[in-house]
Image (tube, grey):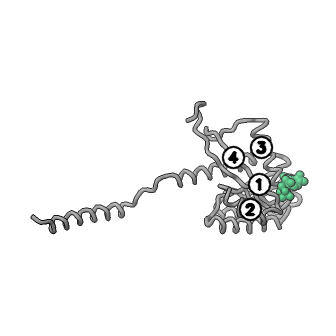
């Protein structure tokens, strides 16, 4: 616990990725200005939260990707619901992430620009299906209209990162089979030394 009674902070490094113009910067600005300027309260679930957020430009992705991927604990993968190509792009980005990290990376999938409903090119069901394939959370947002979902998506990812960090920090318990083997080895050694030791 910290001196102000809150649990100590957990850091998460979050990288925003997606095609050009899908609204990555707009989402980050919306999240930061709402949470940290107008309604400053850097706590979540009674714990202070430190998030480092890396906003990438769409065209930088291929140049800096390995550095971004290694740095980040989790990813916000963004497409625009009126841009089918950007939806296809997040799939290939996710594939690259998994390859570089050599694991199923922690991420949330975000379909942005939901205010442009009359231009929908990627229906909600497709976003939901992809997120379900990735076993991650899915959000539809509008950076232009705002809304609680934008805060929630960052918080959800932070929680996931914290969960995984806690699991990774836990010392591994030895299996009972391993423990039994140790007992038998010890017993066997004792027996042997009794038989071979001179009287
Ligand atoms: N209607 C609408 N427009 C949006 C929304 N989010 C972003 N935009 C607009 O989309 C354009 C691109 O937004 P950015 O936030 O710069 O997108 P980006 O993904 O950071 O773009 P790059 O840095 O080029 O990769 C801007 O004109 C934004 O105003 C949204 O939710 N709804």
Q: Which mark is residue 127?
A: 2
Which callout, 1 or 4, points at the residue further toward the start of the chain?
Answer: 4
Circle 3 sits on which residue?
Answer: 32
Circle 1 sits on which residue?
Answer: 140
Q: Is residue 1 above or below residue 106?
A: above
Which callout, 1 or 2, points at the residue further toward the start of the chain?
Answer: 2
Q: Which mark is residue 57?
A: none
* Callout 3: CB less than 8 Å from ligand 1: no
Image-quadrant location for residue 139: bottom right
Q: How far apart in space, not on screen, are marks 3 and 2 (Cα)?
A: 25 Å
Q: Quadrant of ligand 1?
A: bottom right
Which callout, 3 or 4, points at the residue further toward the start of the chain?
Answer: 3
- Which residue lies most toward the top here? 4
Q: Is residue 182 above or below residue 28?
A: below
- Nearer to us of marks 3 and 2 is 3
**Residue 147 located left or right of residue 181:** right
Which quarter of the figure is the C terminus placed in? Answer: bottom left
Circle 4 sits on which residue?
Answer: 51
Q: Secondary structure under badge 1?
A: strand
| Rendering coords of residue 23 (x, y %) | 83, 54
């Amino acid at each position: 616990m910290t001196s102000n009674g809150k649990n100590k902070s957990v850091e998460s490094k979050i990288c925003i990725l997606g095609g050009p113009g899908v609204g990555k910067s707009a989402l980050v600005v919306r999240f930061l200005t709402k949470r940290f300027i107008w309604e400053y309260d850097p706590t979540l679930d009674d714990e202070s939260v430190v998030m480092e957020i890396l906003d990438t430009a769409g065209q930088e992705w291929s140049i800096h990707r390995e550095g971004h991927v290694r740095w980040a604990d989790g990813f916000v993968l963004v497409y625009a619901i009126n841009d089918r190509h950007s939806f296809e792009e997040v799939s290939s980005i996710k594939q690259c992430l998994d390859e570089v990290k050599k694991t199923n990376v922690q991420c949330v999938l975000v379909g942005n620009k939901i205010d442009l409903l009359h231009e929908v090119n990627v229906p909600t069901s497709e976003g939901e299906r992809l997120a379900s394939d990735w076993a991650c959370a899915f959000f539809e947002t509008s950076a232009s209209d705002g809304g609680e979902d934008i805060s929630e998506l960052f918080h959800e990812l932070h929680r996931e990162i914290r969960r995984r960090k806690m699991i990774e920090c836990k010392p591994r318990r030895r299996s009972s089979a391993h423990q039994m083997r140790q007992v038998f080895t010890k017993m066997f050694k004792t027996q042997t030394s009794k038989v071979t030791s001179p009287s």
